Amino acid sequence: MKKFLIALILATVLFLSAKSTFAYVRVRGYFRRDTGTFVMPHYRTNPDSFRFNNWSYKGNVNPFTFKRGWK
């Protein structure tokens, strides 16, 4: 029983860490309709209703550019 509980806790920790690791979406390059300029492909955080988990929020760091949040 003790080994099962330890395995369950370890699996939960690994699942939660993997979920936060893959919390981004790749955005394909596109042309803006209003100006006609090309926006390079990039990554952004998953869309949701929480503003505190965005890379631009203070205390967070963008894992691709290593820039700190400023908002």
Image (spheres, rainbow, N blue to C red):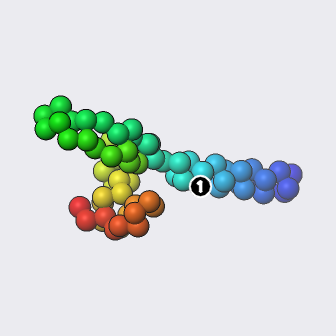
Q: Can you say whether 55 is above or below 68 in the image? A: above
Q: Disc 1 marks which amino acid?
A: Ser
Task: Identify which residue, 8 or 31, lies in the foreground.
Answer: 31
Measured from the top left, where is residue 23 in percent x and y? 48, 48
Q: Work out whether residue 61 can be spotted.
A: no
The image shows a total of numbered marks equal to 1
User: Residue 51 placed where, x, y %?
Assistant: 31, 50
Can you tell which quarter of the image residue 71 is in? bottom left
Residue at image point 45% right, 47% down: 24
Q: Is residue 32 left or right of residue 58?
A: left
* SS category of the residue bearing label 1: helix
Seen from this angle, which residue lies furthest top?
33
Between 51 and 46, the residue placed more toward the observer is 46
Q: Residue at x 25, y 35 (%)?
A: 31
Residue 60 picture location, percent across and down:
38, 64
Give me the residue at 79% from left, 53% from top.
7
Please tell me how crowded label 1 is: few (under 14), some (14-19), or many (20+) other residues with Cα within 10 Å. Answer: few
Quarter of the view holding residue 38? top left
Task: Please provide percent x and percent y for residue 69.
Answer: 31, 64
Give 16 or 3, whichever is nearer the viewer.
16
Taking the image as shown, residue 16 lies to the left or right of residue 34, namely right
Q: Residue furthest left?
A: 34
Residue under label 1, please give it. 17
Is 60 drawn above or below residue 7 in the view shown?
below
State the residue at coordinates (21%, 36%): 32
Q: 42 left or right of 17?
A: left
